[in-house]
Amino acid sequence: MNMSRELKISITLLVLLGITFGILAYLNIMANQKDTDFEGTIVSDAEFKEVVAQLDTSEKLIDYLNKYFTIEDRGDDEAYTPEEFFEKKKGEPWDFALFISYVLFENKYESAIMRYKYKDQAGEDGINAVVVFRDGDLPKTIIFTSSGAEIYAHGWSFEDMFQKEEERLNIKIQEYSISYWTDAGELWPEEWFKRE
């Protein structure tokens, strides 16, 4: 059987097109596969925004977190976005702090995330995160313990808050950073400051 040159070229092109479309279909399936492998329930953007809007007081926010979320040590320096934290319902203090600060910001509270580096009594270094915010006229701090999130009034300065944290955890705070949400919906970059 002798095929003409045109027929051979046509068959070769069809085979190449079939391979190309097969690869593209496979890549599309793999790209979409990541979405279906997530172990939790993926929430909609509308649901996330609705819950954030309903958490319009610090008390509602703390109650909600303590009812539905758990603190865990992930061993990861990369924090979840507020949406990821909302979906996973668990995270480290840094994840809690980002979410809380975001919710407070969206509900028109003045708030910031305060991270601090410390030394404990054994000389070990650590980093912790809290959220400082103004609730009416009072400055308050949201902390994270094994029992969940808690609020306390910390006085009128960061130094007052540092002293309260040092007493509560039996540590010595050495450096701190402050981050807050901008109107563009971004977390303002943190810069570390030595504590004097």
Image: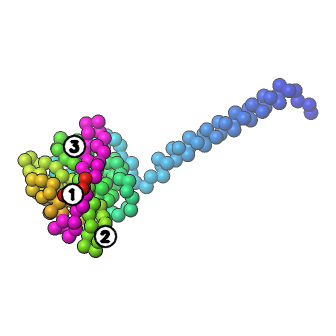
Q: Amino acid at mark 2?
A: Glu
Decide: marks 2, 1 in contact (CB < 8 A)? no
Q: Quadrant location of the N terminus?
A: top right
Is tag 2's residue or tag 3's residue first in the polypeptide sequence? 3
Q: Is residue 172 left or right of residue 48?
A: left
In this rendering, position of residue 116 left or right of residue 20: left
Residue at position x 61%, y 38% in the image: 24
Q: State the SS at label 3.
A: helix
Residue stretch in magenta: 166-192
Looking at the image, the residue that sits furthest to the left is: 137
Q: Label 1: few (<14), some or many (≥20) within 10 Å?
A: few
Between 82 and 47, the one nearer to me in the picture: 82
- Residue beneath label 2, please? 124
Q: CA distance from mark 2 to mark 3?
A: 34 Å
Q: Secondary structure at mark 1?
A: loop
User: What residue is pinned by disc 1?
Assistant: 195
Q: Give the x, y percent position of residue 36.
A: 48, 49
Please tell me whether residue 76 belongs to the stretch shown in magenta. no
Neighbourhood count class around disc 2 (C-alpha, 10 Å): few under 14, some 14–19, many 20 upward: few
For marks 3 and 1, the one nearer the N-term is 3
The residue drawn where x is 21% and y is 48% is 112
How far across and down, in percent of the image, does residue 81 sit? 34, 48
Residue for point 16% across, 49% down: 133
Q: Amino acid at mark 3?
A: Phe
Pick the residue in front: 31 or 44.
Answer: 31
Label placed on residue 105: 3
